[in-house]
Image (cartoon, rainbow, N blue to C red):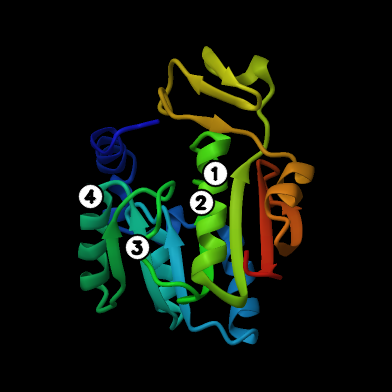
Amino acid sequence: MKTEKQWDEIHREKLSPFQEKASCLMDEELERIVPILKERGVVRILDLACGAGRHTIYLAECGFKVAGIDISSAGIQIALSQLEKRGLKADLKVGSIYEVLPYDDSSFDAITCIRSINHGTIEEIWKTIKETERILRPGGIIFVTTRKRVPKRQRHPFKEIDSHTYIPLEGNEKGIIHYFFTKGSLRKEFRNFKTEIWVDRKGNYYCLLGTLKTKS
């Protein structure tokens, strides 16, 4: 897994365009679910692995009370700067999404995690899912997007470290763990949610919209 320092470098380099305009980097599928969140009375949202705040800012602009957490202190600093620039507020913290999350039980109406949850081992992902179940209120909503499997012939040179899990040895995601879900495994791991799963418009990511069924 990337260290905080490595993620800091990624945010400073790859997200520099964000300094000018966040919307160009926003996941289009998030726009699709915002009306659903409003219809279901969502007020408080946690943006897991919020990075430099591209989705955090959008959610704040939509009128939600937003919190965010990310391992990169540089990403958090960029997000806070951009929020201030736009006259917005969000409660942002530095921390790993694969550890116990620093929030009380049932403290959020919804959680988003865009293109991030799969950058850990399956054991780490299990911890994250359990934590989302803990901090969501009963009937709370989760929205997750995760990369579909990339055929081996289309990947950079890589090292396979476990089933469905590999690390690229070259490219801009060198050293980052990639875990690939299928629709079936998404339903299995998010089994405490009533889920709807679809493929994004570009055909590269699975999108999961879930409603928490039980508290475990």
Kind of residue at badge 3 = Pro
Q: Compare marks 2 and 3 and give the one earlier in the sequence.
A: 3
Left or right of residue 58, residue 155 in this image: right
The label shown at residue 89 is none
Q: Position of residue 152 (x, y in %)?
A: 66, 17
Residue annotated with mark 1:
125
Q: Is residue 194 left or right of residue 93?
A: right
Q: Secondary structure at mark 4?
A: helix
Q: Are marks 3 and 1 in contact (CB under 8 Å)?
A: no
Q: Dot 2 corresponds to which residue?
A: 128
Marks 2 and 3 sit apart, C-alpha to C-alpha, by 12 Å
Amino acid type indicated by mark 1: Ile
The secondary element bearing badge 1 is classed as: helix
Q: Are marks 4 and 2 in contact (CB under 8 Å)?
A: no
Q: Are marks 2 and 1 in contact (CB under 8 Å)?
A: yes
Could you give the CA–CA distance between mark 4 and mark 2, rounded to whole angstroms?
20 Å
Image quarter in which the N terminus is found: top left
Q: Is residue 191 above or below residue 185?
A: below
- Which of the 4 quarters of the picture holds residue 23? bottom left
Measure the C-alpha gap from mark 3 to mark 4: 16 Å
Instruction: List the residue tagged with mark 4.
Output: 73
Vertical comparison of 181 with 17: above or below: above
Q: Nearer the viewer, mark 4 or mark 2?
A: 2
Q: Position of residue 37 (x, y in %)?
A: 60, 78
